Image (cartoon, rainbow, N blue to C red):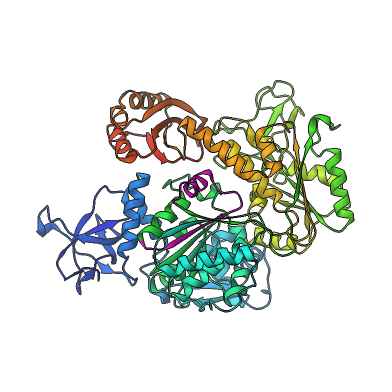
Amino acid sequence: MDAFYDQGTLVAVLTTQPLDRLLDYRAPEGGCFQGAFVEVPLGPRKVLGVVWGPGKGDFDYAKVRSVIRVLDAVPMRDELRSFLERAGDYTLTPMPAMLRLATRAPGLGEAPSMRRIYRLGEGEPPRLTDARRRVLDVLRDMGGLALTQGELAEAAGVTPSVIKGLAKTGAVREEDAPRDTPFPRLDADYGGKDLAEDQAKAAEVLRAGAASGRYGTVLLKGVTGSGKTEVYLEAVAEALRQGRQALVLLPEIALTAEFLTRVEARFGAKPAEWHSGVTVTERRRVWKQVAQGGAQLVVGARSSLFLPFRDLGLIVVDEEHDTSYKQDEGVLYNARDMAVLRASICSAQVVLASATPSLESWANADAGKYTRLDLTSRFGAAVLPEMRSLDMRGEDLPSNRWVSPTLQAAVRARIAKGEQAMLFLNRRGYAPVTICRACGHQIGCPHCDARMVEHRFLQRLVCHQCGETIPKPETCPSCGAEDKLAAVGPGVERLAEEAAALFPEARLAVLSSDLFGSARALKEEIVRIAEGGADIVIGTQLVAKGHNFPLLTLVGVIDADLGLQGSDLRAAERTFQLMRQVAGRAGRAEKPGVALLQTYQPEHPVIRAILSGDEEGFWKAEAEERRAAGMPPYGRLAGVILSSTDVQEVFDLGNAMARQDAALRRVGAQVYGPAPAPIARVRGRHRVRLLVKAPKGVALQPALAEWAGQFRLKGELRMAIDIDPQNFF
């Protein structure tokens, strides 16, 4: 049982404020448990904190203030406190920032009756203004879910008075927030499917793991469409039978709609959801019920790892190779690695599921740290797609066109049969560069060293680094020439334009994350496509992530070479994964599929590995290259990103850090740099990178902390340390 502190006893409180220490307070009237969520005074403010342990008492007791109140929430368990401390140590993140990750439930201290919520009412208001229409559209988009006044006003771009006015007409219903009720109980024996032989064997191993009550990690590798989901749902069922909770992480919000339907079919009720598309009211309910045991299964994004589970017995990381599990802003962590850490602390099982695992997971399975299970055949009647390259050097294609004659003919043949085709290009927008044909000027972002990308649907240029947008200029900003600005290279919108011209009778659907205002709108479009609402799907990386389009039988990759350029450590691995994942969208039902890869380098080892399907050969060759170079997963890397509005200041700090590296040399680590980051300015801040490389097995984090601790950051200077970096921009 957690320690209890009587009234007046000194307690140490960790707050969410950016302070470098625990603060002493007196326990409030009635006392409090260790782990209690509390409100404490800090200067003139009241702030959120957690009772972390006994107070130090190292200053005048008479000056110690009292905890204001204990919040109505289950105290934080030892397991979660330990996880936050160890995750903070690993990622070199201050504890207040870790606590913020674990307290993302709005209104934690409020009584439920204090919240008012709004949902769609009956009929239309007598006077329908543009502002009122926007409010009603937002509520319709939410599919019956309730929103707080602030959420609704922000989403519709209106003032609260518009919402109040609609409530008076009955077109919008104003209600008290329901108490945070438990989620419907899931039935582990409700809707299990008959599994094929290799699926049944894998499911048995996962069930035994979930029943053991011990920690273990399994790499569940199965070709796309092999039924990995049905297999790991058997592990979820076993966790539920044991009375423990389960968490399934998905890489993309757009995947949740289809997944929730499958969960409901398997367990007879929907699970709890946790991601940015969930309303404030629902997030608060999930957070509270997870702690009380009223939510057995959570399906969520990477941040759901920090929820206060009462008894977490299983974590599934679906599409574990996906780069979106790495958080690149704020607290820099990889959810896949943190899932393994949390499970080891609370004696839970981890299932890492992927058709194309990350090299890190492959190496851990190869070394015996993870159990590996392989599913080799597609579920039901589906077979793996045939994969072929189209050598673009032999295709007769005008310079402003991107779909080869061979691919055009294949698309027409599929449409004629009533099937769907997909054209894939991993580039958002219309064109990656806008150039002046008179002077050669390329339009860049005013705040970043990045080219602005034309988005023709928006009629604007957009910076994909900071989000800055400007109207597309009529004249060149450099030389003033009119009508000389040209879009260079293809983006997904330009590809859609070309497809409309090539296939005028076809119904087109474009799937790109920046073309949808909300996660819900994106989900609805994916459902529409799956039901046959389009003949040709044009998409970016978003379409590679686990979607199931039964009518899709042809995938055409426009530029298979795109990821092979540059010096990215993981370029070959990511291209291999992406191409195999995209190809896996084809032929997932009864009709066989074909994947055609347009390439100017058909002899490239990565392209050859993709076509041959020799995955083990590819991983072994890639592993040998990394091992020889001492690169992850056979060595350690840490990225250091320095930034400031003053370019000289940031280089001076970088040079000083490179010189004063004794703490790193002592553990055998080397510093490379400083060098300008590939995108050397973002949001007006100049960026410099250093890279630290160390042998595997060294205590890198303490050495990094000692090294970085020598330097005082003044004024505008900022430093971020990225352990195990995935990107180098």
In depth, the one of 151 and 586 nearer the eye is: 586
Which residue in the rendered view is the most extreme toward the top?
439
| Residue 292 is inside the magenta segment | no
- Residue 83, horizontal then vertical, whole percent: 35, 56
Please name the residue shown 74% across and 21% down the image. Answer: 438
On screen, 709 above or below 386? above
In depth, the one of 728 and 48 nearer the eye is: 728
- Residue 441, horizontal then vertical, whole percent: 66, 24
Can residue 729 be seen by looking at this rendering? no
| Residue 350 is inside the magenta segment | yes
* In-image side of 607 versus 212 (left or right): right
Q: What span is in magenta?
A: 346-369
Quadrant of image for the N terminus: bottom left
On screen, 631 above or below 138? above
In depth, the one of 281 and 51 nearer the eye is: 51
In the figure, residue 436 lies in which quadrant?
A: top right
